[in-house]
Amino acid sequence: MHLRDLLPAVLLLLSVSCALLLGFFAFDSETAVALIKRAGYWVMLANFTWLGINLISRATPLAEARVRLGGWIGPLLFISAVSVVLFALQPTGYKIIMDEPVLSATALRMHEYKEVMTTARAHDLQGVFTQLDGYVDKRPYFYPFLVSLLHDFTGYRSSNTFLLNALLTPVFLGLLFVCGRWAWPRYGGYCAVMLFATVPLLAMNVNGGGFELLNLVMILAAVVAAKSYVEAPSLRRVDTLILVGLLLAQTRYESVLYVLAVAAVGLVGWFKVRTLLISTVTIVAPLLLIPFALQQVIFSDYQGLWQLKDGAEKPFLLRLIPENLEHAATFFFNFTDDQQPNSLLLSVLFVAALVVTLVLGFRWIRNANFSGSKLLAVLPFFAVILFNFALLMAYHWGQLDDIIATRIVLPFILFQVLFVVFFIGRLPQSRALHSVVMVVVLGYFMAVTVPLCARSDFLRWVPVQHEVLWLQQEVQEHEGTSVLFITNKHLVALVERRPAISQVQAMLRKGQLDLHLRLGSYQEILFVYPSTVDSKRVRELKLAAGDLEANFELELIKQEKLGKERYMCISRLKAVKWLEGEVREFELEDLSLLDDADTKLRFYARTLP
Amino acid sequence: MITHSERLSNLRASFPLIRVLLACVGVVGVFSAYFATPVSITSDIVRYGGYWFILAAFSGLVGYGVSLLQVERSRCVSLLRRLDRVFVIFFLACLGLCFVHANFGPKILMDDAILMSTAKNLHQTREMFTPTFGRWVYNDFSHFDGYVDKRPLLYPFAVSLLHDLSGYRAMNPYILNALCGVLLLGGVSLLGYLCSVKKGAYLLPLLWISIPLFAQNATGGGMDLINLVMIVGVILLSVLYWQRLDSRSEGALALAGVLLAQGRYESPIFLLPVAVVIILGWLRGGRVILSAGSIFAAPLLLGLLLQNKFFAQTEALWELHSGAETAFALANVPENLVRALHFYFNVGDAHANSLWVAVLGFPCLVFFTLYLLREWRQLSVARPAHIIIGLFGFFLFIHMAVILCYHDGKLDRLFAARFALPFYLLLTISIVIVLERLSHKAAIWSAVGVGTLLFIVGFTLPMNAKGVFTRRNYVANEIAWLQSVADREFEPRSLVIDVYTIPWTIREVSSLSPLQAYSNAVRIYEDLQSGKFSEVYLIERREFTIEANTTQILPSKLPQGIFVVELIGERSFQPFTVIRVYRVIEVNREAAIRLAESP
């Protein structure tokens, strides 16, 4: 082998080494925060643009084969119809609090400043909604990135976060249809789509603002790209696979493991053509993952970001597995609790398929007419899905019957669906079988899924979700007015592009708040907070505002009962109270010394609470 | 091959003596009128005649346009046929990107409001007049006070035409500018096509989309975009004239030049390249064409000349400030140049500039100049379009030089940034021509195209979305809020006392400045008593002061005790300033009489 032929491999090794060094060892968390904030967006934009260019270059020959599209009209109509039904099954809005508002706030920051950051404080600065301080969040940011692009190209709308999931729905169903057809050539596409639709969790995510649906789309896209590459390995095809894999790695926390699946598929291709297919993308790919690695550096330095609950000391523990498996069984086989978005049909079919497969052994699979490229493309991804599920069972927050955690199971449900479809595809084919399968799946969907979705949003026991939706509505009603919102759910107001700060900030910057109250910078400064009522003295309706009342003179202007003994209150700030020994003033410059408007504006910005 | 001497002899043989004489009479007549007309009556001539001059020029241009379309039908059809689906989608996408973060509304106050007011008056009375005070008499809102404005007439004329054709609508100024945005993108696509065929037709509009200033003006109510559309239109007509050398294209070019001259204050500069192109065309074709459009061009400029005459003589209209003694001076160049570079190369979001166009455009401008200087002889035969574009480019450069001499030509000031638009045309054209000259390789064009697209996503769109350079104009925000308070709280047929009277007059609300109102407080008292006004509202802006760590609101600058008021609204739009809206509940007649009698 000539030395020059080895150069790409050497460059790839160098790139991997550089990426590991720069990503995990070169920077402390403070520098990592600065780097991600400034450069994270641009690295992702480069990755995304590169994928776009790659797909366009691949689409040109595909466009010539458009005559074959005729056969896809039926599936397209079917996918559109299922998408529309899924939109109608659940109300649109935030489902998982505060994950989804955080993603929306990050998307807003990315849209306006191209910074990977979640704004924590925003003000109206001479007519301009200005995002001030913030923090680099632990959440992977491919989803906010896409929402920010939607803002860029269609104008800012807080509902774009839901629109993105709506747009992703037919894409997901389309990819699922394609994979279903591989598993069961004739009816697999229809069966896979309908089977997944019986899981209300899908409808919930289709109408939410989270990144779960995007994660599914990216897994399936990676599988499709992997199959295309394994079929006929080429530089262009491996580029698609790698670029999709990189974006998938930045979609959900644990999705980075799919990089291993991509690498495995890449190796399969190399073996198949007996050449090292190393393109520029392959060499640069490890470097494009540096922001992800930096995010992990930040994550590991701030243990609070793990949100460990109930006294858990570590996020993953083997001893959690039995308990979590019990919770998983409760979720999968639930048929009485309206608050569990599961599909009993899918669970039963999956178990049946699994048992039969295990009993009959792998002879079935060996004898099946299942093309090697599909198997080689799909198996590494399924392996990661199963590993992730095992990881989830060891996770301190891995109780699948807790609605906040349920969504994490979606990739495993994808595996279940494709496995069941594959299993049915291996059964002796007859018209009766097809009819029975379709009638059972469709019947379950109509008889169980639709009515369940109609009577439940699965969030009855999540009061904070009700509070957030109420706050969002209140904030939207203040459009065109000059109001500063102070609330611990300030991200909800920020996402509506209204000036807002947290209650903590308000406590810390009482002097500034007092100054701007006197200056009339806002027509109103409103505190929004939840409150409870002592059930024994419910007639008094004296709503406790905790520390707020000790620090601020408030005038209650609205209260709404959101549940038993649960109220949300809006109070207008009348004055700032000073506690004994508290420093009332902060240093102000003499305005007369500030000569021009820009200096005044900068000074004004510094004094904002 | 016709030699130069043969051309000259042809020119002499076909000399249209009568038309030349008529043209001379026109030119001499215009200049005589300019010098002979006393300043005192120029404003009346402009007020009552200005509209008709521009209407005549516009009608002539439309006539020539229709006639040109007839003879160029086959070329138009073939051009339309060559437009593939991809380009149409691309063009629509460009329009989408331009307007996606649209914030339709006034951008430059009081310019936009004055133009809107003039346009409304042109629509209603055909008088070039800007009303400042009106009152409801029976069921009509009649104007009783106003002035002839210094602003060139093309934009108000076009808005008034839109009012005429579609009915009066307060949104029409913005609709017109949005249409101008579409026309400009179409125009630069054609210009790009002339510079570098298809690649240019794609790249030039994309470069324009990367300039936030373009989107800002396409959604505003100012005259800058129509001026730019006319510059592009005149360049395209010049190229057409060069190709056809007939009376239709010459007449269209001359009249387009007349309209362009009335696009902005500095735009008469472009009459020179128009004249140069026409004369060079005569030399090239070996005959003096001198169409009716060219003959009447000079007389049709009379309105503009007289407007300039009283403008030049009325110092207040120059709005000299910050100690400036003359409007234009070479001494302004160093500071303005630094501030222009600060604007063009700004990396933040406070200015509506495109760093991408500046970084590519300035070096390309140098190369473009060298290219023209070195190859102009060959180009005049092989690529005449490049020579014509180069000629106009030179005048775009002169235009920038004029701006740099202007006492208020500081491009990094929010209100002055729009002066940068014509120079952006020169920069973007330079980029396309230099790329065309440098390489035909698709890779370079693709790299610049992808770079422009990434710049648009990474910089232009967020800048447009935040709109710092637009929203920071607190006066526009104030006026919008005041109008909303008025809609909610004000009684019909009220009087508003405010420093900005024109926005109220446009909305057919009687308004007086505080100075006028306080000196006529007795009259206001009587008008309230007689029911001429149902209510009186007072708008006041108050500032805060911070001294020795304490905040205080400064005392009112208005005389106290005349109007007894109650507060109905308060809001802050500018740091340390509040604007208050009061309802006058009583006028103290005795105090008003004392104030009127005081010296």
Image: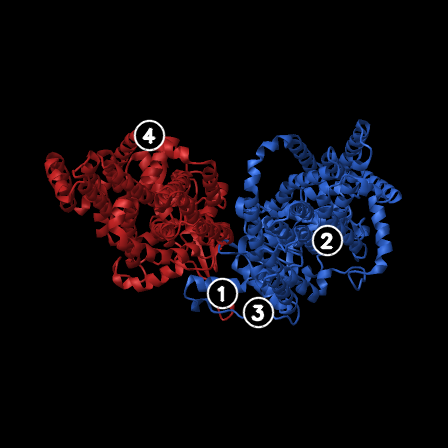
Q: Nearer the viewer, mark 4 or mark 2?
A: 4
Measure the alpha-carbon separation of dots 1 and 3: 16 Å
Quadrant of the image containing the N terminus of chain A: bottom right
Q: Amino acid type of disc 2?
A: Ser
Query: Is residue B409 found left or right of A210 in the rendered image?
Result: left
Q: Which residue is mark 3?
A: A585
**Tag 1's secondary structure?**
helix
Contact flag, marks 1 and 4 (Cβ < 8 Å): no
Measure the alpha-carbon separation of dots 2 and 3: 31 Å
Instruction: Tell me the tag on residue A603.
Output: 1
Same chain for the residues at labels 2 and 3, yes or no? Answer: yes
Q: Nearer the viewer, mark 1 or mark 3?
A: 1
- In which image quadrant can residue B410 be found? bottom left
Q: Amino acid type of disc 4?
A: Arg
Contact flag, marks 4 and 2 (Cβ < 8 Å): no
Same chain for the residues at labels 4 and 2, yes or no? Answer: no
Position in image of residue B188 (x %, y %): 37, 44
User: Residue under mark 3: which chain is it in?
Assistant: A
Q: Amino acid type of disc 1?
A: Phe
Q: Amino acid type of disc 3?
A: Glu
